[in-house]
Amino acid sequence: MSRCNVIIFYFSRGGHTRALADAIAEGVHATGAEALLRTVETDSDAASMRDLPLSKDELVSCDGLIMGSPTRFGHMSASLQKFWESTSREWLNGELIDKPAAVFTTSSSLHGGQESTLLNIALPLLHHGMLLTGIPYDQPSLHHADAGGSPYGAGALNQNPNAKLTANERASAIALGQRVATIARQLKQTKDT
């Protein structure tokens, strides 16, 4: 069986969403799967991007996808929305059907719209027929969340300097990465047999 790969597709301007993506990648790696950190290219960020932009070929060939954005008035960033609006061919061909997916977000305040953003990010994934998963409520970090994260997906507040996650934010992000990667590996094994 070829190695399972999970794409962590995100947009981050100040580094907080990227910090959450890094913790999710740690969870993916803990299962033995490969985490591919990918971003969306914008005109103003092209020169300073840390990760490659997501290509449609990578999207189609991934075994799982975890997508994140800062909260923009309860919605994902416009650049991520623009990317999904360009995926009609992949949608019509059913290229993402039955692949596991999850979502994550950051906001600058505790009541900054994280849950509505997580639901908004999930919409194109559901339209593509992906299998949306969240963080089960037996994850201890959800019971002590002093900042971000919910059963809908991982979350973080942008209030810590240097994009540092709280222990609970980090634990929830790692758990989400592990969950999606585990499901992706199980589905891949089923398809390969």
Image (tube, helix red, strand yellow):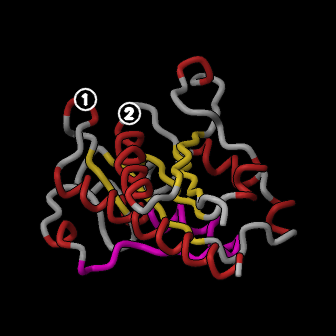
* Horizontal arrangement in the rendering, residue 49 relative to residue 173 (left or right): right
Q: Position of residue 35 (x, y in %)?
A: 51, 50
- According to the image, label 1 marks what residue? 162
Q: Position of residue 64 (x, y in %)?
A: 59, 64
Element at label 2 = loop
- According to the image, label 2 marks what residue? 15
Q: Kindly identify the residue that appears in the image at 67 percent across and 43 percent down.
A: 54
* Residue 91 occupies quadrant: bottom right
Which disc number belongs to residue 27? none
* Horizontal arrangement in the rendering, residue 9 relative to residue 160 (left or right): right
Is residue 117 visible from the viewing direction of this image? no
Q: Is residue 164 above or below residue 21?
A: above
Q: Position of residue 126 (x, y in %)?
A: 63, 74
Q: Kindly identify the residue that appears in the image at 64 percent across and 33 percent down.
A: 41
Q: Is residue 150 above or below residue 58?
A: below
Kindly identify the amino acid type of the residue bearing the numbered disc 1: Asn
Mark 1 vs mark 2, CA separation in Å: 8 Å
Q: Kindly identify the residue that appears in the image at 70 percent across and 54 percent down.
A: 59
Identify the image quadrant of the C terminus: bottom right
The reply to whether callout 1 and callout 2 are in contact (CB within 8 Å) is yes
* Horizontal arrangement in the rendering, residue 157 relative to residue 176 (left or right): left
Q: Which residues are magenta?
A: 118-138
Q: Position of residue 66 (x, y in %)?
A: 52, 59
